[in-house]
């Protein structure tokens, strides 16, 4: 897993958990719960986009990886958030369906990386 993949992974899981707890404890209706979810999704997307800053690589490839990380981080946030809402606020055991989807999004998020285009030199060339 590339080190930079942790940047969007942690906010996605932690914001999904915290926002879900807050909305569930306050028993917010659908409108305010949607606003909290959108705010958490925007912050998660920003974390996903910022995960490629300072990485060597082609600019186009960095943009694609940033976009893919942002989309999968928001999907991970949504899965954790919806699990917390369904399980805590609505007391539905059917909310467990969001857990495997969250795991799949987390695994997918950890696979995106910017390739380093510099040629690989063997030990014989450097000696």
Image (cartoon, rainbow, N blue to C red):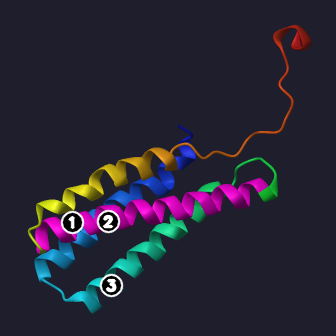
Local crowd size for mark 3, using a 10 Å CA cut-off: few (<14), some (14–19), many (≥20): few
Quadrant location of residue 52?
bottom right
Q: Nearer the viewer, mark 1 or mark 2?
A: 1
Name the N-terminal-most of marks 3 and 2.
2
The magenta segment is 61-89
Q: Is residue 75 left or right of residue 30?
A: right
Using the image, tell me which numbered label, if any, was put on residue 16. 2
Q: Residue at x 21, y 66 (%)?
A: 84
**Residue 82 % position (x, y):** 27, 68
Q: Nearer the viewer, mark 3 or mark 2?
A: 3
Q: Residue at x 82, y 10 (%)?
A: 123
Quadrant location of residue 81?
bottom left
Q: Residue at x 85, y 20 (%)?
A: 121
* Residue to which mark 3 is pinned: 34
* Residue to which mark 1 is pinned: 84
Do tag 3 and tag 2 residues touch (Cβ < 8 Å)? no
């Amino acid at each position: 897993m590339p080190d930079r993949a942790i940047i969007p992974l942690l906010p996605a899981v932690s914001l999904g958990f915290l926002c879900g707890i807050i909305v569930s404890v306050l028993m917010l209706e659908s409108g305010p719960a949607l606003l909290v979810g959108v705010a958490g999704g925007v912050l998660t997307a920003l974390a996903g986009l910022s995960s490629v800053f300072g990485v060597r690589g082609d600019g186009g490839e960095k943009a694609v990886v940033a976009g893919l990380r942002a989309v999968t981080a928001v999907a991970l946030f949504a899965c954790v958030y919806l699990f917390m809402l369904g399980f805590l606020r609505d007391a539905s055991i059917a909310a467990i369906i969001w857990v495997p989807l969250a795991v799949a999004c987390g695994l997918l998020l950890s696979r995106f990386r910017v390739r380093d285009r510099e040629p690989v030199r063997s030990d014989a060339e450097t000696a």
